[in-house]
Amino acid sequence: MKRLVALAVGAFGVRALVRRRARTIEPADELRERLAATRTPDEPEAPGTTARDEPLDGVEARRADVHARARSTIDELSN
């Protein structure tokens, strides 16, 4: 009886391993599409992300502002 239980448990374990290895990794584009489909229109984007249609000038201005704030913080800490 013990052998039968051990055999059944082993079979379930092997089946679980086979199923796990059979899963495929989804490409990033498909994951992005699925995530976009689940978002509501009024939901804000995640912090640190930018809209794809944002003009490059806006990004450069933000980058310059971040660098300026970082420099001022470093100056404050070093004094």
Image: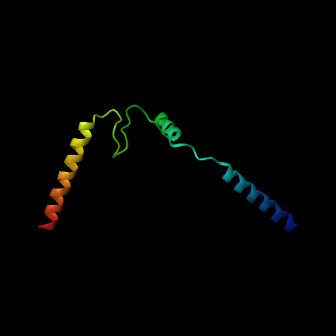
Q: Position of residue 47 (x, y in %)?
A: 34, 46
Please name the residue shown 53% across and 38% down the image.
30
Quadrant including the C terminus: bottom left
Residue at point 21%, 52% (across, down): 67
**Looking at the image, is 63 positioned above or below residue 75?**
above
Say left or right for 73 vs 46. left
Lateral position of residue 29 relative to residue 69, left or right: right
Task: Give residue 73's position: percent from left, percent from top.
Answer: 17, 59
What residue is at 48 percent from the left and 39 percent from the top?
Answer: 32
Q: Position of residue 48 (x, y in %)?
A: 33, 46
Q: Quadrant of residue 54?
A: top left
Residue found 35% across the figure and 43% down from its top:
49
Q: Is residue 67 above or below residue 32?
A: below
Of 77 and 8, the residue lying toward us: 77
Nearest to the observer: residue 41 or residue 61: 61
| Number of numbered discs | 0
